[in-house]
Image (cartoon, grey):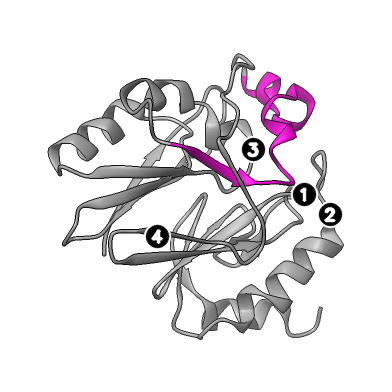
Amino acid sequence: MILKTFRAQVGEFQTFTNMYVVFDEETKEGILIDAGAGADKIINYIENMNVKLKYIILTHCHVDHVADLRKIRKDFPRVPIVINEEDAEGLAKAEVNMCELLGVENNFLDADILVKDGDVLTFGNVTAQLIHTPGHTAGSMSILIEDALFSGDTLFKGTRGRTDLPTGSEREILWSIKDKLLKLPEETIVYPGHGSTTIIRDEKEWYVEE
């Protein structure tokens, strides 16, 4: 598979959001993981690389991961938007998606495909396993593709996502990380929604005593 990382700021948010284009080198079928900002650069890359975009997958419903959905969908009107079933309602609720905090209009598109834990999506010869990892939001999910884990705002390098926002839960995020993500192979590379990459082995030390 081919992986390209994009980083951009959303509205008044001071932290850069990571977005990822992943595609099968042979068939050119691919996916976009999150659509927070930087739509023009993402669209240009997809077109220049001749990627046949098959899905736009959202790790969760927060504005910094969905703000440019409309811009991207305008260029790819037939590409379905995918989100976990527990976060679908949050796309339409300003109090859940947090758009007002970042000065972004609450006009995000509804998802076309609602998924649950264990569902699988394929693009070309590549398989994406969808892992429900609640805690940051009720419907947060991580995406496992080969040896790469796209963890959204659940697991970061040396820390974890916030749980003090609507539908967040400290108990659930710890369960998601310890009982699901940290059980993956230790050399799995973690591509988070913010910040730099890490690997599962290096994150285990933070949760030994919790």
Q: Camera-side residue: 7 or 73?
A: 73
Measured in 3D between alpha carbons, the distance from the residue under mark 1 to the one under mark 2, in whole angstroms, is 8 Å
Q: Answer yes or no: is residue 125 visible.
A: yes
Identify the image quadrant of residue 205. bottom right
Q: Do the residues labelled 1 and 4 touch (CB within 8 Å)?
A: no
Callout 1 secondary element: loop
CA gap, disc 4 and disc 3: 22 Å
- Relative to 38, does residue 46 appear above or below in the rendering? below
Name which of mark 4 and mark 3 comes first in the sequence. 3
Tell me the number on the disc at residue 61. 3
Q: Identify which residue is drawn at 25% across, 60% down.
A: 24
Q: Where does the image place residue 183, in percent across and percent down from the top left?
A: 62, 83
Q: Quadrant of the N terminus?
A: bottom left
Mark before the other along the chain sequence, 1 or 4:
4
Q: What residue does disc 2 label?
A: 169
Q: What residue type is labelled 4?
A: Thr
What residue is pinned by disc 4?
Answer: 122
Q: What stretch is highlighted in magenta?
A: 80-102
Answer with left or right where residue 181 lies relative to residue 176: left
Residue plotted at (69% across, 37% down): 88
